[in-house]
Image (cartoon, rainbow, N blue to C red):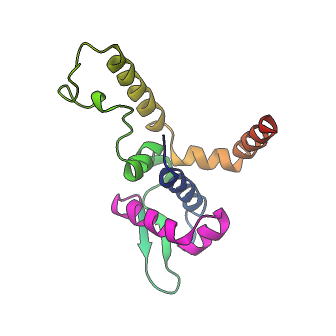
Amino acid sequence: MISTKGRYALVMMVDLAEQEGELPVSIREISERQGISLKYLEQIVSILTRAGLVTSTRGANGGYRIAMPADQITVGMILRATEGDMVPAECVYSETGCERNGACPSQLLFRRVYSAINEVIDHVTLKSLVDEEQNGSCRKLRENASRSVT
């Protein structure tokens, strides 16, 4: 499962990508627009900066920008920076990580799940998320989800 940190990192990166080409964006602005705690965003931006996905500018007009074009940043890059590897079970990683290695049918399943997760997150770009947000796909999805819950 993806933690709040990973989800908020995606929200933050989409917000920054929507401002691409403009002045640097302050964390406070993102916090207010997205309704996310300023302190939590400060932690997340630090991680994203260390990962080379965000750059910072100091000073009166300082703030943050995405470090490369949005079509070159994948969801996988963002999630791995905040969540680590997206492995669904420890046995996927290591040939010696499980005493049942090679004799466990679920190991093959978990490897398939891992492969599928990586296939998706490594092929969805930040730009495609921005495009979906701007054309209203996310809003329609939220509306449909809220209708099905009530």
Residue extending furthest toward the front: 99
Residue 95, quarter of the rendered image: top left
- Which residues make up the magenta segment? 26-53
Q: Position of residue 147 (x, y in %)?
A: 81, 38
Residue 132, quarter of the rendered image: top right
Q: Nearer the viewer, residue 58 or 69?
A: 58
Q: Main secondary structure of the magenta part?
A: helix
63 above or below 117? below
Q: Position of residue 28 (x, y in %)?
A: 58, 74
68 above or below 107? below
- Residue at 65 percent across and 64 percent down: it is 35
Residue 34, quarter of the rendered image: bottom right
Q: Is residue 56 magenta?
A: no
**Quadrant location of the C terminus in the rendered image:** top right
In the drawing, does residue 51 fall left or right of residue 38?
left
Q: Nearer the viewer, residue 103 or 81?
A: 103
- Residue at 40 percent across and 48 percent down: it is 83
